[in-house]
Amino acid sequence: MLLSIVAAVAIFAILVVVHETGHFLVAKRLGVRVLRFSIGYPPRIFGIRHGETDYALGATPLGGYVRMLGDEIAEEPGPDSIKSYLREVALDLIGAAKSTGWLKLQPQAILTRANASRKFDEEALGWIAETLVEPRPISYAGEALAQRHAVEGRTPTAVLGRDLNVIEKLLLKEVHERGSLPHAIDTLVQARSGVLLEAFKARAFPTQRLSTRFAIVLAGPVANMLFAPLLMIVVFMIGVPTLLPVIGTVRQDMPAFAAGLRQGDRVIAVNGKAIKSWDDLSDAVKASGGAPLQLAIARTGERAPARLTVIPKRLPEETIYGNKLPTWVIGVSPRGDKVTLSYSPFAAVGAGTVQTAQLFASLCVGIAKIFEGATPVREALGGPIMIAQMAGKEAHQGFADVALFTIMLSLELGIINLLPVPLLDGGHLLFFAIEGIRGKPMQLRHREVAMQVGLFLLVVLMAFVILNDISRIVG
C-alpha cells in the first residue's frame, strides 16, 4: 500500500511539473510575470525565491499551479492586484541587493532580521531607498578619492548589480519620502499613475494580446503531450517488455485448433512476414479480412518450422472501451512469455513516436466513447485510489511498466485539460475563442458564472470517481 501511494504521488508530481513548466516557460518567454510556481496546493510548506518567481512546495501533493501577475477574470487591475505587484517589485529589489552581497555590509539591525520577514523587508528596502534616492555627495578637489568611493557605493550597480527600472525608481522614491514600504504602496495605489498602470499591464496575464494568452494556456497540455513521446523513446532505448507470440490457450471450437495450432507453439511468420511479438500476430489476424493465413510455427521437438493454414473467423469482441465490435480472430491467447527488446536511438525515436501516436488516438477514441455512452462511465472512470492501485502494481513490475503508465497518464492529462470545461485549460481556450469571434472578452459576470459552474462540475466528478473507487474495493 505504501509503495502504491509513493508511486502515485511521484508520478503525479512529475506530470504536474511537466504541465506547469509548459505554462511557466511560455509565460516567461512572452514577457508575463510569473509570481509563483507551486507543486502541490496550500498550505505552503517550503519555498525559495529566485528572480521574479517564488518556487514553492504545497502540503497537498496532487496538483500544482503557476500564478501569474493579474486577476484572472478582472477587467481592470484592482487595488489588491496593484499592491501585490508593488510588493513583488520590493522583493525584486531586496533579492538583487542580497545577491550582490550589499545587504551584508549594512547595519547589524538589518542582519539580525535577515529571515525574509516582513519587518526585515521593510527595513532593508528603506536602507536601499536611503542609499539610492538621497543626493550623492559632490566631489571637491583634495577629497576626490574618498568622494569617488562614496559615490560608487551609492549607485544601482553597486547595490543591485543592475540599473533601476521606472517602477523601482518610483517605489524607492515613495519609500524614502513616506518612511515605510506600506505607506509608499498605499500612496502609489491611490494615485494610480499612468506609468504604474502601464507597467502593470505590460507584465500582467489578462492584459496581454489574445494570441499570447492562448499560447500560455495551451502550453500546459502541449507539454504533457510532448513529454509522452520523449519518455516513450527513453523506454524503447532502455528496453520494452514484449509479449512473445507463444500460444497459450487454444479454443477447440475455433479456426486455430482446426488448423493444428497447439499450446506452446510459437508463431514466427504470417504470410512470409516475420512475427516478433504477440501484437504483431494480433494485428496480422485482424487485418486479414478473413483471407487464409499461412503460419510458420516453431514447435518444441521439431527442427523445421511447421506450416499451417488458418482462416480467421469474424466474431464480436469486447474492446478496451467496453463496447463490442466484429473482429477477425482465430481463437488463441498468449501463454505469457516475455522478453525485453531494446532499440537503437534512431529506431527508438521512430518506434516511440509511432507508439505514442497510436496510444493518443486510442485514448481520444476512448474518451469519445464515454461521452457517446458506448462505454459505461462506472467502468471507464477512476479516481486517485484506482490510480494509486495501478501505480503500485506497475511499480512492482519495473521501470518500463511505470514509465508506460506515466506516459498514458500524461497523454490523458493533456487531453482532459483541453476539454472545454471552465477551470480547465480548455475552458480558458474556449473563452479566448469566443473573445476572438466577438472581438472583445466575455462579460465579467458571465465568466464568473462559468467558473462557478466549472468548479461545481469538477467537485461532482471528483466525488463520483472517489466513490466509484471505493465501490470497486468494497464490491
Image: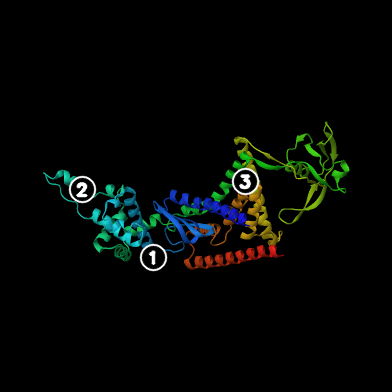
Q: Which residue is mark 2?
A: 151
Secondary element under disc 3, as helix, strand or loop, is helix
Q: Quadrant of residue 461?
A: bottom right
Q: Quadrant of residue 76?
A: bottom left
The residues tagged by marks 3 and 2 sit, at their Cα atoms, a distance apart of 61 Å
Q: Nearer the viewer, residue 339 or 208?
A: 339
Q: Which residue is mark 3?
A: 399
Looking at the image, which residue is at 84% across and 33% down? 302
The residues tagged by marks 1 and 2 sit, at their Cα atoms, a distance apart of 37 Å
Residue 203 seen by the camera? yes
Q: Which residue is mark 1?
A: 80
Q: Earlier in the sequence, mark 1 or mark 2?
A: 1
Where does the image place residue 469, in percent across and percent down from the top left? Answer: 66, 62
Taking the view exactly as shown, the residue that stands out farthest to the top is 304
- Left or right: residue 212 versus residue 157 is right
The amino acid on which the numbered mark 3 sits, given as a three-letter code, is Phe
Where does the image place residue 366, in percent across and percent down from the top left? Answer: 67, 54
The amino acid on which the numbered mark 1 sits, given as a three-letter code, is Asp
Secondary element under disc 1, as helix, strand or loop, is helix
Point out the frontmost of discs 3 and 1.
3
Where does the image place residue 123, in percent across and percent down from the top left? Answer: 29, 59
Q: Earlier in the sequence, mark 3 or mark 2?
A: 2
Residue 383 seen by the camera? no
The amino acid on which the numbered mark 2 sits, given as a three-letter code, is Val
Within 10 Å of disc 2 (Cα), the crowding (few <14, some 14-19, many 20+) is some
